[in-house]
Amino acid sequence: MFTHRYTFRACKQFSELQEGPSMLYNKHSFHHHACKLKGAQSVFSDTPWSHPHGGNKISKLLEAQSGFSNAPWSHPHGGKDNSKFPQALSRFSNTPWFHPHGGKRFSQLHGIPSTFNNTPWSCPHGPAKKFDGNQSASFSVFSRKPTPPPKVESDEVVSLPFFDDTLLLANNVITHMYVYDTVLDAEKLSDSLERLAQRPGWRKMSARVRKNGKGKLEFHIPTEFSETRPAISTTHVKHTTSIADHPIASRFPKPSTTPAVVATTEDFEPLLDESDCPKKLDDYLYKDRSVFGLHIYSFNDATILITHVNHSGLDGIARKDIMDAWLLMLQGREHEILSPCDFHEDPFIGLGKDVSATHRLAERKLSTFALLQWVRKNILDLAWRTPETRLVCLPSGFVEKQRNAAMKELAATQTGSEKPFVSDGDIIIAWLAKAGLSHLPPTSTRNVTIASTFSCRNVLEGSYLPLGKPYLANCAAFFNTLLPVRDITGKSLAYTAQKAREALKEQSSLSQTEAYFAYVRQSTKNKLPPMFGDSNMHFMILSNWTKANLYLIDFSAAAMTPTDKPVTARYMQAVQSPRKAMELFVIIGKDALGNYWLSGSRTKQNWDIIEAALKREDYLFENLPGA
């Protein structure tokens, strides 16, 4: 059905598998050899599994599921297909199993221990070998601890900028998925991105994340590239069918005609698993993987692009700069690509050391004790509850209508000479605040802190950053809107939108940005952002990506069939891993039809309240149960 770039090249022996059986590969089928598999049930009723060295036969192999499309597991002597192997965990750290004919890796074999202690499991291809290209880390037969790939002496070793060198960023992998109803040239896409990453100033895209002898993170930036060690880690899966025939990709939602929850992003995460997308810091430390990577799914009528990045290397605006430069490469306009800031230097090495003003919210900053109290009260959300990420569509015209109403209301109540203003983003922040508090008593006096991100590039240009140059790193802070629950739920969108606008204006000046980063610098070695409010507050995080215009990125230059029409995404989503932040909301952007797309991560129960309100056409959450 499709081909894959990589094949299985790594095998090992060991005498006991605690969480999974070994699968022995040959050219035509999979053979499972064991003397005992506890709790396993065979689906081949007349043909038991057996160990090659003799011993007890196995007659039970429970709940098996193949991860290879159209390539079911089979018994060497024939019999019924065994097509289910769920929740399987490979004991080979960072070395996934692969189907010999290509396709999705099989990386999980779970819950079936070997009891044949004196006859180790083995792979018929012999001892372990490294992967070519996107190499896996080597590992010991006797230890589960992986080791990083060997250091490449020609690599340029660069320290992370001071504010980027945190586990909070390094343990955060951001994956974007873009869906295009056009067949794009995969080779042209990968070649142009590869050439961009080899340009002076842009090589940071190819950086490999490593730890030095003291355990500190650093970037190893290649100076030489080859087919086995490309600048950008790229994979490609080619389907010969329509996207409508794919069991997962066929389910991408279309815009709704009213505000609605249209999808759960976890439903599409198997596409990320199949493409071997990184999900955690170890996926960079123990593989020869670039900090910015690409995966392409090709169908005969559509294309899915997946980009993934370790947050220690780039933020949202830096990713946008990369996308813009990539398009210029595709269009043959390389001479228009700007030279980025020198990645050898840290422009913010002195940011926050000399502060000329007190932060506007200094009196509301949580002390260490208050922060610990807040953590204690929210420990279930922070450590145990698993958030669910759902996608919301606000159809074309809805936000415009709400903004026009807000502007009219603010004009009628304005007392000063300054003309009132709120943006679409302010209105959506206010709408998300109402939605995000729909599970709380609407008359509650409990305080709410809405921590919204903003890019600091504009305010820091001239003082810390050179003018007009892309900065391929992190440069963002939070501005905080503090209001009680009852004000957000009981008052209009205009009220909360105006408060958000005022907070941004007051907290985003140069002196306030310096004061903010002084707090970051003074915090723990992990350089945590300051929190404002009180120990009993409800805390929300909002991030607005609208200015990045991600939905309007035009890949028409890569279309297999030349076209004069823009080729823009009809759907996109972003996934944060390995752990999603609770009560995190993202304004992904505005598509070509004027629809706004939002995502949020919260508990299923809290999402169900929002979804029920929207289905009742309570689009402003004014008639919630118990209100």
Image (cartoon, rainbow, N blue to C red):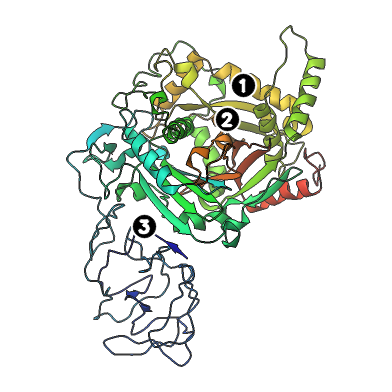
**Identity of the residue drawn at 40% across and 48% down:** 280
Spatial CA distance of label 1 from label 2 is 10 Å
Name the amino acid type tagged 3. Arg
Name the amino acid type tagged 1. Ala
For residue 5, which numbered disc appears in the image? 3
Looking at the rendered structure, the secondary structure element under dot 3 is loop
For residue 331, which numbered disc appears in the image? none
Q: Is residue 530 visible?
A: yes
**Identity of the residue drawn at 78% across and 32% down:** 490
Name the amino acid type tagged 2. Ser
**Identity of the residue drawn at 42% across and 70% down:** 110
Q: Which of 320/2 is in front?
A: 2
**Vertical placement of residue 595 versus 350, above or below:** below
Where in the figure is residue 315, as x and y percent of width and height? 45, 33
Q: Which of 484/623 is in front?
A: 623
Q: Which of 622/560 is in front?
A: 560
Q: Which residue is mark 2?
A: 452
**Identity of the residue drawn at 77% across and 25% down:** 404
Callout 1 touching callout 2 (CB < 8 Å): yes
Where in the figure is residue 273, as x and y percent of width and height? 46, 57
Q: Please tell me which of labels 1 and 2 falls first in the chain.
A: 2
Question: Which quadrant of the structure image shows residue 589?
Answer: top right
Q: Please tell me which of labels 1 and 3 falls first in the chain.
A: 3
Q: Which residue is mark 1?
A: 503
**Vertical placement of residue 28 versus 500, above or below:** below
Mark 2, residues whose alpha carbon is within 10 Å: few (<14), some, or many (≥20)? many
Where in the figure is residue 224, as x and y percent of width and height? 23, 39
